[in-house]
Amino acid sequence: MGTLSPYRNWFYGLTVVLLAMSFYLVYKNGKTVNKVILWVATVVVIGMLLYTNRFLLTNLLT
């Protein structure tokens, strides 16, 4: 357990809020390149969130 582990859920929430704001701003008046970069970043973030919670997910699926 790290020192920031108690704040993990807050960081998850902040990440989702910032991604939502980014989608709003990019799709409001963004270029195609920005949309691609945003989607790549979103996939990376989702992968990291799933990886950090892999033990929880394996327990739920079995």
Image (tube, rainbow, N blue to C red):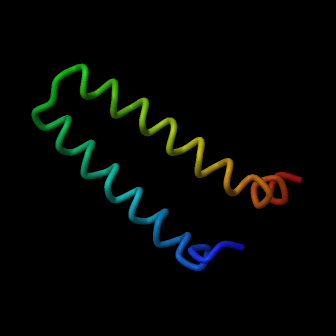
Picture quarter with the N terminus: bottom right
Q: In the picture shown, does residue 25 fall above or below 5?
A: above
Question: Residue at point 49% right, 62% down?
Answer: 12
Q: In the picture shown, does residue 61 fall above or below 40?
A: below
Question: Residue at point 61% right, 77% down?
Answer: 3
Apparent side of residue 44 relative to residue 32 in the rendered image (left or right):
right
How many marks can you see? 0
Q: In the picture shown, does residue 15 fall above or below 19?
A: below
Question: Residue at point 51% right, 38% down?
Answer: 44
Q: Residue furthest front?
A: 3
Apparent side of residue 6 relative to residue 45 in the rendered image (left or right):
right
* Place of residue 37 in the rendered image (x, y in percent of width and height, measured from the top left): 34, 28
* Place of residue 25 in the rendered image (x, y in percent of width and height, measured from the top left): 17, 43
Q: Residue furthest top?
A: 32
Q: In the picture shown, does residue 54 fall above or below 6?
A: above
* Place of residue 55 in the rendered image (x, y in percent of width and height, measured from the top left): 80, 57
Q: Residue furthest left?
A: 29
Q: Residue furthest right?
A: 62
* Place of residue 33 in the rendered image (x, y in percent of width and height, measured from the top left): 25, 20
Question: Residue at point 22% right, 20% down?
Answer: 32
Q: Depth check: give the residue in front, 6 or 60.
A: 6
Apparent side of residue 31 relative to residue 50 in the rendered image (left or right):
left
